[in-house]
């Protein structure tokens, strides 16, 4: 059962060893595709056991850290957070709130279809878009002001009339997202390639076919190019070969499935195009450094292998 503001309740929603599927729900305005919250409020209504469980979202979640320090996990990477940290968790990603009680943050939750179509649509639609910014003081003040306006707009929506207030919230969210799009590229993250570039088209193809197609030659054929040219484009965009990009995407989905579902490792492998369980196990160990079972054990997930 999903509780208030897209959070989970004590009674259900947790699969197997503690991974929870979190669907968007605004308890105050059910038809509204945006909500604002605080990490302290989430802690107040959520048990420590549940708060420590990884979650997979079906909505966007912006986390603007206002005080304290802690580590927030996004797709199995721990992000060190302090005042001025901005995180963007996208639909389908697995995340876990920082356990440190002193960490405070403002949360903005919104459905993929709530914002109007934007010039920055690629930032919204890209499942591998930037996840972590460390904001300069001026940017932190600006984004805090935007989220203050969202809080006020959400309160206005509850008070009614809902139609103008809903339009106001859409425009306020648009302004916030446009301001985020103007932030410098996060340190350690490569800028996205421009529209129409080979790597952009390759990544779009990969996102739809990674579960069934792992061959560089096949993707090159679809894109009317050569494997050598495709690999060169990937090296320029990411510093990794085309094969490494494919393997990384398959490995990420394998991690998500191992953490998020009760599927055996063999079933996860079959879902990702491996006909033999041993081949999947070797692939997972090569790309992640862990066996599927060890990866689940590290998350504290007890499941059948």
Image: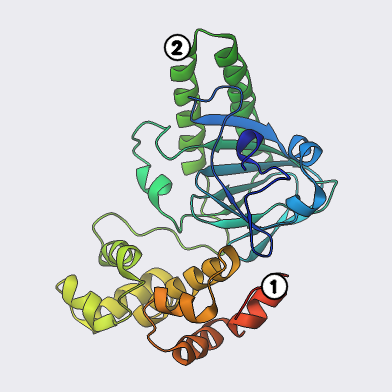
Reply above or below: 183 against 178: below
In this picture, residue 115 sits left or right of residue 6: left
The label shown at residue 192 is none
Q: Is residue 128 left or right of residue 51?
A: left
Count residues near mark 1 (Cα–Cα under 10 Å), then give few for <14, some for 14-19, many for 20+: some
Q: Secondary structure at mark 1?
A: loop
Assign a secondary structure to mark 2: helix
Task: Give me the residue at 29% from left, 82% from top.
Answer: 215
Counting from the top left corner in percent of width and height, residue 74 is at: 61, 59
Q: How much space separates mark 1 and mark 2, taking CA atoms?
A: 49 Å
Front position in the image: 20 or 176: 20
| Marked residue nearer the N-terminal end (1 or 2) | 2
Residue 243 lies in quadrant: bottom left
**Foreground tag (1 vs 2):** 1
The image quadrant that residue 206 belongs to is: bottom left
Query: For the N terminus, which image quadrant?
Result: top right
Q: Residues within 10 Å of mark 2 (few under 14, many from 20)?
A: few
Quadrant for the C terminus in the image: bottom right
Q: Is residue 12 left or right of residue 283?
A: right
Q: Which mark is residue 164?
A: 2
Q: Which residue is mark 1?
A: 302
């Amino acid at each position: 059962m999903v509780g208030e503001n897209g959070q989970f309740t004590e009674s259900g929603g947790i699969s197997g060893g503690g991974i929870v599927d979190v669907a968007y729900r605004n308890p105050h305005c059910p038809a509204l595709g945006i909500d604002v919250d605080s990490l302290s409020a989430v802690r107040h209504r959520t048990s420590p056991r549940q708060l420590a469980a990884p979650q997979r979202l079906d909505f966007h979640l912006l986390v603007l850290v206002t005080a304290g320090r802690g580590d927030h996990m996004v797709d199995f990477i721990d992000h060190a957070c302090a005042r001025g940290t901005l995180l963007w968790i996208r639909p389908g990603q697995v995340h876990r709130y920082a356990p440190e009680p002193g960490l405070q943050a403002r949360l903005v939750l919104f459905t993929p279809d709530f914002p109007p179509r934007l010039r920055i649509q690629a930032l919204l639609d890209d499942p591998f878009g930037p996840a972590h910014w460390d904001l300069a003081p001026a940017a932190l003040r600006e984004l805090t002001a935007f989220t203050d306006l969202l809080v006020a707009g959400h309160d206005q929506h509850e008070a009614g009339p809902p139609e103008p207030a809903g339009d106001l919230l859409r425009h306020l969210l648009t302004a916030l997202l446009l301001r985020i799009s103007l932030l410098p590229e996060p340190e350690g993250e490569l800028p996205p390639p421009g529209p129409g570039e080979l790597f952009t088209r390759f990544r779009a193809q990969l996102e739809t076919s990674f579960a069934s197609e792992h061959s560089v030659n096949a993707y090159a054929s679809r894109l009317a190019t050569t494997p050598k040219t495709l690999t060169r484009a990937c090296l320029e965009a990411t510093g990794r070969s085309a094969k490494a990009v494919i393997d990384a995407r398959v490995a990420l989905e394998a991690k998500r499935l191992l953490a998020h579902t009760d599927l055996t490792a063999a079933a996860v492998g079959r879902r990702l195009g491996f006909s033999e369980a041993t081949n999947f196990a070797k692939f997972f160990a090569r790309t992640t450094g862990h066996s599927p079972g060890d990866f689940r054990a590290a998350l504290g997930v007890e499941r059948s292998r």
